[in-house]
Image (cartoon, grey):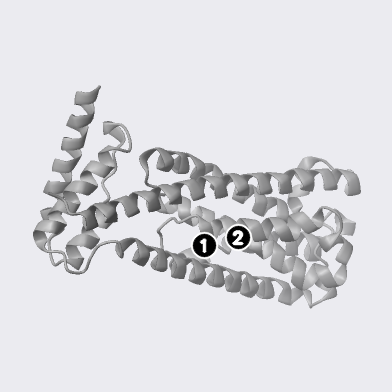
Amino acid sequence: MIDDKNTHSREQLTVLLRRRSVIALCCGILTLILAFYGIIEGVNQTWRKLHENAFFSFIYFTMISNTLATLSVSFILPFAVEGVQKKRFTLPRWVAVFHYIATVSVVIVMVIVLSVMSWASPEDAFGGPNLVTHIFCPLLILVSFFQIESGHVFTMKDRLLAIIPGGVYMVVYFIEVVLVGEANGGWPDIYQIREHMPSALAIPAFLLTAFGVSMLIALLSNYLTKKRTKKMYSFWREDMDPIEVRIEAFGIGRMAAESGEESSIQIPYDILTYLAQKYDLKTEDLMKPYFKGLLAEIEDRNRKK
């Protein structure tokens, strides 16, 4: 017989995992709306101010970063919907890293606007819809990123990857603005960089700023991930004996089978591994009761059909 405390721990776990899926879905939709708004508004402004087509609007890093954000949440939303159905939100590492890169890119826009454009051209920085695309959208996308619990810790490699889109853009910007020049068919200095520093310092200054943004976001995200993981694992009592832990694994198996079709059931290997390590067991010791619980729930469900 499973005691009330252990049953309560699984109920807490079910509620937590379902809530994470719902939050990921809502934040993904919010990010999609904000990023798409930034793209549409960028195209409109390019036409109104410069009388250029939509393609020309992509000389703005605002457009590029919002496009990355749109793509990243487009990958996340199917997993969030699946998580709501299965009561567990799981995200492949490559999707989580892509989302992180997109978020860093969007926030870099806000930092450039606040540190450079706000002094050189406040109207371009905050005038009209620019206040939304340059400040409100990046802030809300950043908040959404922190709310989506991917469970992944971002490494130094990830932090360096996150500055690649901005770094590539800055090199192209330098070539178009400084080496080619607007008079020769290059880009206008839309970020007024040459008014604030020597051209030769633009790329190093940008990369340092971008890396600082990447580091701060990764450090805070990693801190929140570890804190949330600790909270999830705190549901289980410290004094459980091996038999109770196996009963827990059995119950987790039943819980997993409740959440979807047999062909799409996921094994919570991370949870089972944690329980094994916490109570000095082997992971394989918990796999057998887990699968027994899984099969028991599937058989019960099939009998009720």
Whether residue 168 is visible here, answered yes or no, is: no
Label 1: how many residues lie within 10 Å, few (<14), some (14-19) or many (20+)? some
- Amino acid type, mark 2: Leu
Mark 1 or mark 2: whose residue is earlier in sequence: 2
Q: Nearer the viewer, residue 76 or 64?
A: 76
Q: Secondary structure at mark 1?
A: helix
Residue 201, by quadrant, is bottom right
Question: Is 260 positioned to the left or the right of 124 in the image?
Answer: left
Tell me the number on the disc at residue 142.
2
Query: Which numbered mark, 1 or 2, is in the foreground of this view?
Result: 2
The alpha-carbon separation of the residues under discs 1 and 2 comes to 18 Å
Q: Secondary structure at mark 2?
A: helix
- Amino acid type, mark 1: Leu
Q: Residue at x 31, y 65 (%)?
A: 234
Q: Nearer the viewer, residue 232 or 270?
A: 232
Q: Nearer the viewer, residue 95 or 278?
A: 278
Q: Residue at x 81, y 60 (%)?
A: 180
Please give the residue where the numbered disc 1 appears in the rendered image. Answer: 161
Q: Reply above or below: 111 against 269.
A: below
